[in-house]
């Protein structure tokens, strides 16, 4: 999980120094309360997101982050099952995952929806080779 956070910090520094667009490198997956099943709408969304990242950046590294929140009944076991479901989906899409982690959230302000959200983070290959920019931003 530390690696994922470091990756996100690195991307912030890179984007502030170049014209390359790194918008959308993290994708949220919303689970139903107490469920580790990925809804069909979320599967479609992550497939589209993965295709877009592949088109824009080529192959890169993917990490998964889930939340543990005992107050909202998101146990370590549930978080691990959610991560396993995401990992299985991503592997079926031909993605090798580098890091899977869970973060314990003890905030009393966290909502159920936030606790039931997992994240897939994408790190473009240029962040390892340090050649992320300047490159033209792809117009949509």
Image (cartoon, rainbow, N blue to C red):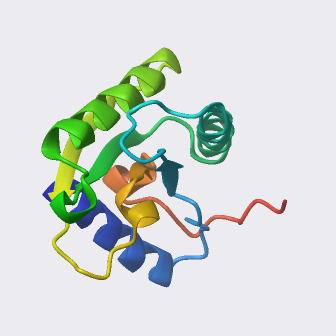
Q: Is residue 92 left or right of residue 68?
A: right
Q: Residue at x 51, y 53 (%)?
A: 27
Q: In the rendered view, would you say 75 is above or below 3?
A: above
Q: Residue 75 appears at what percent x and percent y?
A: 18, 47
Q: Residue at x 30, y 28 (%)?
A: 84
Q: Is residue 78 left or right of residue 137?
A: left
Q: Residue 45 appears at what percent x and percent y?
A: 66, 41
Q: Residue at x 27, y 31 (%)?
A: 81
Viewer can see residue 74: yes
Count of all numbered marks drawn on residues in the image:
0
Viewer can see residue 99: no
Q: In the rendered view, would you say 107 is above or below 121?
A: below
Q: Residue 113 appears at what percent x and percent y?
A: 46, 62
Q: In the rendered view, would you say 52 is above or below 13?
A: above
Closest to the observer: 43 or 3?
43
Q: Is residue 91 left or right of residue 110?
A: right
User: Which of the image's four quarters has the N terminus?
Assistant: bottom left
Q: Residue 103 appears at what percent x and percent y?
A: 18, 58
Closest to the observer: 111 or 83?
111
Q: Is residue 133 left or right of residue 74?
A: right
Q: Quadrant of residue 83?
A: top left
Q: Residue at x 60, y 40 (%)?
A: 42
User: Which of the image's four quarters has the C terminus?
Assistant: bottom right
Q: Residue furthest right?
A: 140
Closest to the observer: 95 or 124?
95
């Amino acid at each position: 999980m530390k690696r994922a956070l470091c990756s996100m910090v690195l991307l912030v520094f890179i984007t502030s120094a170049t014209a390359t667009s790194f918008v959308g490198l993290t994708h949220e997956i919303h689970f139903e309360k107490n469920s580790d099943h990925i809804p069909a709408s979320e599967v479609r969304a992550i497939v589209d997101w993965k295709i877009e990242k592949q088109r824009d950046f080529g192959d890169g590294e993917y990490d998964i982050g889930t939340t543990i929140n005992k107050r909202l009944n998101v146990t370590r076991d549930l978080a691990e099952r959610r991560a396993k479901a995401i990992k299985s989906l991503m592997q079926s899409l031909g993605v090798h995952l580098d890091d899977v982690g869970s973060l314990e959230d003890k905030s009393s302000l966290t909502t159920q929806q936030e606790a039931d959200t997992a994240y897939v983070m994408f790190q473009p290959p240029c962040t390892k080779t340090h050649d992320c920019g300047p490159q033209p931003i792809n117009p949509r």
